[in-house]
Image: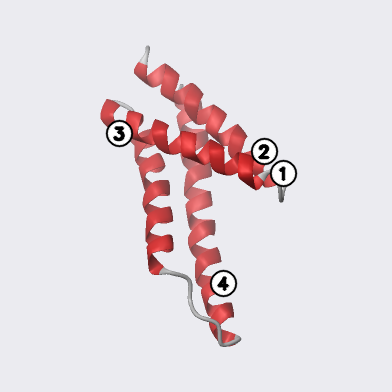
Amino acid sequence: MTGLRWTLGIVIVLVTAGWVALITIASNFRRSFGGSEQSPLLFIASVMALMLVMASVAWPERRALLHVVAVLMLAWCVGCVFLARDTVFAATLGLIYAAGWFLFYYRAVWR
């Protein structure tokens, strides 16, 4: 269980850091061509969702948090299915992470 928590935690930290870097670089790139920036609400909402997933891995004793993140992870899975139309590799990685998180969720809630 500890190895799974560490793996999920490290992956979500890397994904969050990469997502923040991608949004920052993309926003600067769009501005250089005279385009408008992305909505700050998109940035804040996505980072907050990733932070919730991170918190659920850090504090598995908070059952309400785990249940909220379970709903979020279901939405993640639906997003991965829609993403699979464009890029199967990224969607598969997302679904593998979600499967790992649901295994963690099962073991944390129903020990």
Of callouts 1 and 3, which one flags the residue occurring earlier in the amino acid sequence?
3
In this rendering, the count of numbered labels is 4
79 left or right, relative to 106 = right
Residue named by callout 4? 26
Between the residue at mark 3 and the residue at mark 4, the CA separation in whole angstroms equals 31 Å
Q: Secondary structure at mark 2?
A: helix
Nearer the observer, 64 or 4: 64
Give x and y (percent) for residue 33.
61, 86
Q: Which residue is disc 1 drawn over?
A: 89
Query: Which residue sits at x=34%, y=30%?
Result: 66
Q: Is there a contact, CB below 8 Å, between mark 2 and mark 1?
A: yes
Give the mark nearest the N terminus, 3 or 4.
4
Q: Position of residue 83 (x, y in %)?
A: 64, 47
Residue at label 3? 65
Name above or below for residue 73 compared with residue 46.
above
* Residue toward you, 37 or 19: 37
What's the distance in space between the residues labelled 1 and 3, CA to CA?
A: 29 Å
Residue 92: image tag: 2
From mark 2 to mark 1, how far is it between C-alphas? Answer: 5 Å
